[in-house]
Amino acid sequence: MSDRLSWPASWEEQRAADDASYREQLAYLLERSPFYRAKLSGADPGDGLDGLAHLPLTEKHELKATCTADNPIGAHLCVPMSEVVRVYSTSGTTGAPSYIPLTASDLANWVTGSARSYGASGVEKGDRVITTYNAGPFVAGAALDAFTLIGVNHIPVGTGSSERLLLAIEQLRPDAVVVTPSYAEHLIELADLRDSTVRRVLVAGEPGGGEPGFRAKLERGFGAHVTEAMGIGDIGPSLWGECEEQAGMHLGAFGFVHAELIDPETGRPRELADGASGELVLTHLRHRAAPLLRFRTRDHVEVWTSPCACGRNTPRVRCHGRTDDMLIVRGVNIFPSAVREVVATFAPRVSGRVLVRPSAAGVKQEPPLPVTVELAQQAAPDSDLAAAIRGRLRDVLVVQTVVELVPWGSLQRSDYKSRLVDR
Ligand SMILES: [Zn+2]
């Protein structure tokens, strides 16, 4: 195995190395980053990583506010554009895209981190791997080079034609496919893949792969092991990757990225301890082009720091959703993925697809919360079923809902990401 793909001997040892990297990164920011020179003026950086939590958080909108016609990247750009080897865009689901510049060393570190994350899933040199990311302008494209580093036989198919993808699975006989959870769900409706050669399904791009009910559905449909990976455009692709133990995603970008946890409402730090949950905050450790410090990811995660049976000594996370998707019903936080997970327990009577339709604008909602549930193929609407779903949602998530059952095929299918909330 290449040194670039080895894991730390212990987390303490990694933490000590990260502390040294962070001190250099902070000095670099104060010297090179107009954004952080202004933001950190007067702040006490304390002593290395132990002092990090005293520094202010970075919000995406703050970075965007510094973009100008002369500098469309933003004031966090630390190098002349002549040193930049690539510029990605974030997908810009809300507003104009952000540009993500990388130096050659930034790009190499992204590929190394992604290769560790995908390597954790068990794919190895010699395996055939079909990927469905459309590299294009987006950060996920950089993760594709990770498969070259691992040494697999990489077969990029992209999205756009499911027929072509299914034909490639049949003819090229891959060991693994890399897809979004939504596309994986769609593929097993289109074809019976239980007898295909696929033994591993690597999902990323949205939550779902780690929800037990949804994962079980994909594993049944593919007759394969499902593991997930996660990144965030502004920091890096595939920062986290799940091993075969399926016990959460390991930090594969260790040494390049430092992870913290905060209370999403107050912004106060929470200890990154076994079983803790909160919003993930990430800091670059060795980035050059446009490094970020304490960047709010808006991803709500659960964390584990206890040893994993696989022996990889980095923290693990499971993402339950993004702040943007969260609703608050009478003080209770509800992620639509949690609604889907509860509804999935009614399979095979339901298809597993749901759409939460909040009646008011904004995050805060008055009960009952309207939820549309798609029935299984050939299933007829049944008021007892709707009542049973409503009852289980109330018992598990402590939320009053009104459940509407709709025929199979009514809710959107996607070869990218699914919308679980209709705002
Ligand atoms: Zn593990």
Image (tube, rainbow, N blue to C red):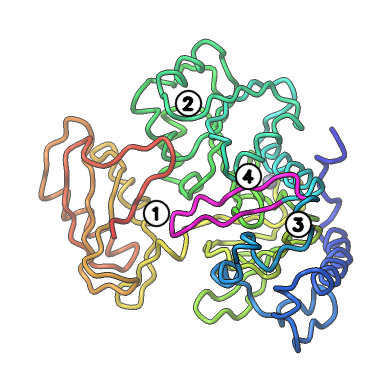
Q: Amino acid at mark 3?
A: Ala
Alpha-carbon distance for marks 3 and 2? 43 Å
Image quadrant holding the C terminus, namely bottom left
Rendered image: mark on residue 289: 3
Q: Looking at the picture, how far across and down is residue 369, in whole percent?
A: 23, 65
Using the numbered discs, state the Cα–Cα distance from disc 1 to disc 4 in whole angstroms. 19 Å
What crowding class fits label 1: few (fewer than 14 Cα within 10 Å), some (14-19), or many (20 or more)? many
Nearest to N terminus: mark 3 or mark 2: 2
What residue is shown with label 4?
Answer: 242
The residue sitting at 16% across, 38% down in the picture is 407
Question: Disc 4 or disc 2, which is closer to the eye?
Answer: 4
For badge 1, the amino acid type reads Ser
In the displayed structure, does residue 338 sit left or right of residue 412?
Answer: right
The numbered mark, 1 or 4, whose residue comes first in the sequence reads 4
Residue type (three-letter) at the residue carrying disc 2: Gly
| Residue 72 x %, y % | 61, 60
Q: Earlier in the sequence, mark 1 or mark 2?
A: 2
- Ranked by sequence position, the earlier of labels 1 and 3 is 3
On residue 223, the disc is 2
Label 4 C-beta lies within 8 Å of the nearest ligand 1 atom = yes
Name the side, left or right, on which 85 lies relative to 352.
Answer: right
Q: Is residue 128 above or below residue 312?
A: above
Q: Earlier in the sequence, mark 4 or mark 3?
A: 4
For label 1, the residue is 337
Up-down relation of residue 196 to residue 150 (above or below): above
Q: Position of residue 3 (x, y in %)?
A: 87, 39
State which quarter of the image contains the N terminus: top right
Q: Nearer the viewer, residue 91 or 345?
A: 91
